[in-house]
Amino acid sequence: MRIRLYEPPLLAKGGFFSFVYHALITCRGAVLTDAPRPLPPLTQPREHLGAWLEVDEKRVFIDMSDHVFLFDLDALRLCDLYFKTNLNRGSLRAVLAANRAEPLEAKIRPFFSFAGYLQEYLHPSLPRRLYETWKGRTEDICHIVGVYEHLRRDGEASVYRPDGPDITPNRAHYWARVHTREALQTVSLTGTCRLTSRCNPSLEDHTLIFPNLSQRAYRRAILRSKFPVINTLPHALLPWKATEALALGRPFIVDVPPLTEFPEPFQLRESEHYLSLLPPQPFDSPIEGRVLHRYTSDDFQAGAERIAAILRDPDQLARMNRAASAFRDTALNPETVAAYLCDTVEALS
């Protein structure tokens, strides 16, 4: 099997494709090429994260967009196989129908999102092993998530109040993170709860919103915890940081469960690999891909109390820890990634 990878810079550590490229090079002998990619990157309506490769002369496109509704339709028309991270079939079919391209669905397969620094999480240094031995799982949670604005400081009421303003994606993004933090604190869970400014110091009040943490400090906060907490509202998809938790052998908590499809080697199951704070809700519109349900403060509180009870159940904790470690050892393995890609392409023949 001959594999060519376009855009060698995508191999660089920290990028969305680094783990995938590394897997194909080390496990399947893929080679990098400086030849121009078959099509230029998509930039409208927004920048699109995509990579091209050739497997035995079949054109393969990997779509790493973190939007369920965003597809590179020109790439989809040209390629033989299109792998889509964050694949939601309802959103996919709405987009294809709007573009009169329904037959192209046959080319699409689900993919998975891998953290850019995943190799560092999977291969611990001696200091990190010592730190985990000394401090590992000594706290309940690690909730470190970024926000883009400070609506409470600006005088806005929460969209999760009955009399709150209209729910928009940016308001849901902000208030879900605020309510998650506060609900988890009310049930006396220990650990690091920190909303960060995404390097925008104007948001930082050092009461609710704080500066970003370094990668090392963030990793140590996860190691101290039993469960990292990841906010997914309003997108209801699983961000790449979930693989950072799993690479450290930690199950995780999301505010709402993902509405996206996982490939078989990377299947994640609720109550086994992760817990949900809130009950699932569908997208308000498949083609927009946002959950804009008006959850209540009681919903957040009930979820926090349920999670606190699980954290006091040693048997369930042990089961979930075993599942997270097994996922790390099998799914987050370069051979698994390479085999999924190459076997799927080979099945086209």
Image (cartoon, rainbow, N blue to C red):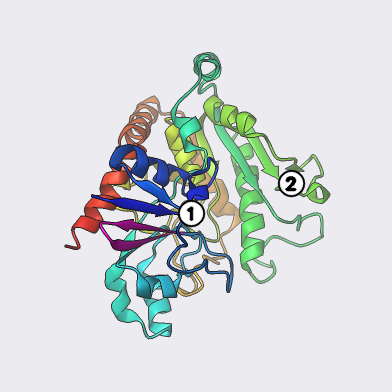
Residue drawn at (74%, 56%), measured in percent from left and top? 149
Task: Choose the circle earlier in sequence order: 2 or 1.
Answer: 1
Which label was assigned to residue 166?
A: none
Question: Toward the viewer: 346 or 305?
Answer: 346
The residue under label 1 is which amino acid type?
A: Glu
Q: Quadrant of the C terminus?
A: bottom left
Can the viewer see residue 277 in this picture? no
Q: Please tell me whether mark 1 sits on a helix, a strand or a loop.
A: loop
Q: Tag on residue 7?
A: 1
Percent coordinates x, y for residue 313 in the rendering: 41, 29
Q: Determine which residue is flagged by label 2.
A: 199
Q: Secondary structure at mark 2?
A: loop
Residue shown at the point (30%, 53%) measured from the top left: 263
Three-letter code for the amino acid on which mark 2 is drawn: Cys
Q: Which residues are magenta?
A: 51-62
Asked if the stretch drawn in magenta spans residue 154, the answer is no
Q: CA distance from mark 2 to mark 1?
A: 28 Å
Residue in front for this viewpoint, 284 or 182: 284
Q: Is residue 252 left or right of residue 170?
A: left
Q: Name the spot of residue 125 as percent of width and height, x first.
A: 50, 20
* Main secondary structure type of the part rendered in magenta: strand
- Give above or below for 336 relative to 130: below
Nearest the camera: 85 or 189? Answer: 85
Sort mark 2 into few (<14), some (14-19) or many (20+) by Cα contacts within 10 Å: some
Q: Closer to the camera: disc 2 or disc 1?
A: 1
Seen from the viewer's position, the closer of residues 336 and 238 is 336
Residue 92 visible, this angle: yes
